[in-house]
Image (cartoon, grey):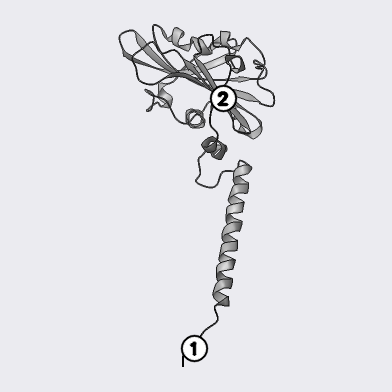
Amino acid sequence: MQHYYPVAPARATFSFSFLRLVMLLAGLVALSACGIRLPGNSDSPTELAEAVTEFRVVPASRAFISVPSAMLVMERDLGGAIEQRITLPNPTSLAGENTIFLRAQSGSLARGTRFVLTEQIMQFGGAPSPFAEIAEGDLTATSDSFGDITYATMRPGGDLVCVLAFRRTQTASRALPRGTDALDIMMRNCVSGSVERALAPIGASAFGLGLPD
């Protein structure tokens, strides 16, 4: 005689396991939404937004800083942070674009005043060419009326000079976009001439327009 056994317990076990999985995923989403990093996770708190939010072209008047030589300004809103990329002319034959990366941040996303190279590079998605191997020991600094500029230099040959420069402005020295606490800047600029010329796009003259539109 053939026997048939009930399958309800197996279904119950499957349902319970599925419910636990749903609850776990919901918890992970909640932690991500709060900007909480899980142990061993070094990703940005805005990682999810960065993965799904594309840049869009905006008028040059929306740029956080004044860059008369800007060829293109792009922007994306990540929720707690607003990112812009300003493309600069590249009169050299070197690979890659001359770009100013800007990140206006609010609340806990704004980092402290101490400069940490790895954190700065991470929030902009990595160091651009030719600075992939940049280290703390490569850095030097200069200052102007708006604070410090920390930078590294590379000389590919001839009179060419490349800089990878970082700076931060705060509301005390620069009118930031509404609702943000700090503006972090990273610039890759390769030019013919001096280091001063390469740094000029994020110099003091870039911070004279006040609040962006």
Left or right, 168 with reference to 151:
right
Which of the two residues, 56 or 25, is positioned nearer the viewer here? 56
- Image position, residue 139 (x, y; %): 44, 20
Number of marks: 2
The amino acid on which the numbered mark 2 sits, given as a three-letter code, is: Glu
Q: Is residue 172 above or below residue 197?
A: below
- Residue situated furthest left in the rendering: 157
- Location of mark 2 (residue): 75
The amino acid on which the numbered mark 1 sits, given as a three-letter code, is: His
Which of the two residues, 48 or 181, is positioned nearer the viewer here? 48
- Residue situated furthest front in the rendering: 1
Residue in the image at 57% along x and 63% along y: 18
How many other residues sit within 10 Å of disc 1, few (<14), some (14-19) or many (≥20)? few
Q: Quadrant of residue 102?
A: top right
- Residue situated furthest bottom in the rendering: 1
Q: Quadrant of the C terminus?
A: top right
Q: CA distance from mark 2 to mark 1?
A: 67 Å
- Location of mark 1 (residue): 3
- Image position, residue 38 (x, y; %): 55, 47
Q: Quadrant of residue 164?
A: top left
Residue in the image at 51% along x and 44% along y: 41
